[in-house]
Image: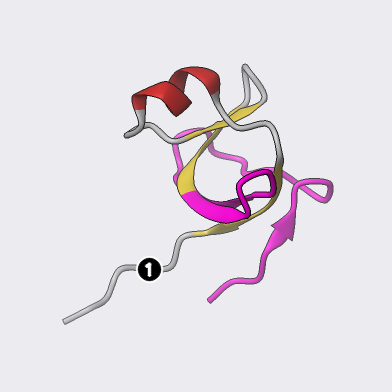
Amino acid sequence: MSEWISVEDRLPGETRAEVLFFVSELNQAEIGKFNESTGKWIVPYRESYYQNGFNYVTHWMPLPEPPKD
């Protein structure tokens, strides 16, 4: 599995790619996307967070490849 990447070092390049990101204010990881136009981290399947987004994200990493049969 990939290592965590600090948001201070770089952000995900593809706005449509879902990643795993760590929300420090909640002390938990979420799967979602970084919206470059708003600068917010969003979880598309959660309507309330999709509109508001997360502000306190410290790290992210690409999602692993799905299992192969």
Q: Residue at x 27, y 75 (%)?
A: 67
Q: At 55% across and 26% down in the image, what residue appears?
A: 53
Indicate left or right for 19 with 8 as reference.
Answer: left
Image height of 14 relative to 3, above or below: above
Q: Relative to residue 31, is residue 36 drawn left or right? A: right
Q: Quadrant of residue 60?
A: bottom right
Residue projecting furthest to the left? 69
> Taking the image as drawn, is residue 7 in sight?
yes
Q: Position of residue 13 (x, y in %)?
A: 62, 41
52 sits to left or right of 60: left
Q: Amino acid at mark 1?
A: Glu
Helix, strand or loop at label 1? It is loop
x 46%, y 60%: residue: 63
| Magenta span | 1-30
Residue sitting farthest toward the front: 26
Residue 1 spot, x, y in % from top left: 53, 76
